[in-house]
Image (cartoon, rainbow, N blue to C red):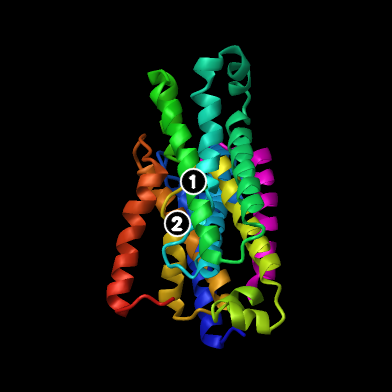
Amino acid sequence: MITKKHSRSLLLLFLVMLVAFVLNLSLGSVTIPFKETIASLLGQSTSKVPWDYIVTQYRLPKALMAIMVGAGLSAAGLLMQTLFRNPLAGPFVLGITSGASLGVAILILGAGAMGGILGTYLSHPYSVVIASGLGSFLVLLAVLGVTKQLKDTMAILIIGLMFGSVTSAVVSVLAYFSPAEELQQYVFWSFGSLGGTSWQGILIMAACFLIGIILCIRAIKPLNAMLLGDAYAQSLGLNLTKHRMAIMLATCILAGSITAFAGPIAFVGLAIPHIARQLFWTNNHVVLLPAVLICGAIVMLLCDIIAQIPGSEFTLPINAVTSLFGAPIVIWLLIKKGKLLF
């Protein structure tokens, strides 16, 4: 059960998220007054017509994507850390991000070698999204196929990391033989981006996000049991193989869809669960899951504000900002609390 103290803390975090959301819509190369931003969200006309377009057609989709990216990666990181009982685990441990990178690398870096075949698909607006999603899905099938008969959780972790290493090696080979222009295009994708997604893309991303979060909610009881060991979980009548598969599937849906639409985003999935544990000082997933969802959304919104460099025409790579902004927070929390709660 969630205590009153935890409920108040979650409510406070949610209010902070709303403030960060509106700030994200207000700040950028063009600063829009707070009241005008809210008026635009409520469907009212603003004093300047371009502000309506900026808020509703550019910044609102980007802010919603930031919320889903932050919340989804944080939830996936929480699942992986609990499943493997490893504080350094994250969404990347199953090779999902590497699989997405391989799909995009084959599309972009392989376009030069295969010319007309891949070059035609590269011009499609959703080509990178489709390639990334297929790469993630194929690696997921490979990992699940190999680990289906395994009962050792650490063996699953090692196999996931090995698949990630293999896909990274293939990407390196493709990069070595690719022209500078295609290599630059791939590198820009690897920086990650929250913008440039249409409303249709946002709806597709939202559907994947909701499916992943529903699976996370269904996994709360098994996750709490797994914290006390496999023997205890089995004594409660839990089918560990079934629940492990469900947890990995939830992680793959969240991490795979996010990487497909936003590119590989570092730090968030690894660090946010630790931030939530330090703030709430609990391992109960009934509290932790909503905590990591909200904390992840807040951090991603704030990182996006920083990446926009308000008042400037330049935009920093979101990947760099998440690490530079987030890592010191985790270090500070660990020093303040004196220990890692896990």
Chief SS of the magenta region:
helix
Q: Is residue 207 left or right of residue 323?
A: right
Residue in the image at 58% along x and 76% along y:
226
Q: Quadrant of the N terminus?
A: bottom right
Residue in the image at 47% along x and 51% along y:
24
Q: Secondary structure at mark 1?
A: helix
Q: Is residue 225 left or right of residue 317?
A: right
From what the image shows, is residue 34 above or below residue 243?
above
* Residue on which disc 2 sits: 268
Residue 206 in the image: x percent, y percent? 66, 50
Q: Which residues are magenta?
A: 193-220
Measure the C-alpha gap from mark 1 to mark 2: 18 Å
Q: Residue 164 — which label?
A: 1
Circle 1: residue type: Gly
Query: Most extreme residue toward the top, as rendered?
Result: 116
From what the image shows, is residue 32 above or below residue 21?
above
Q: Secondary structure at mark 2?
A: helix
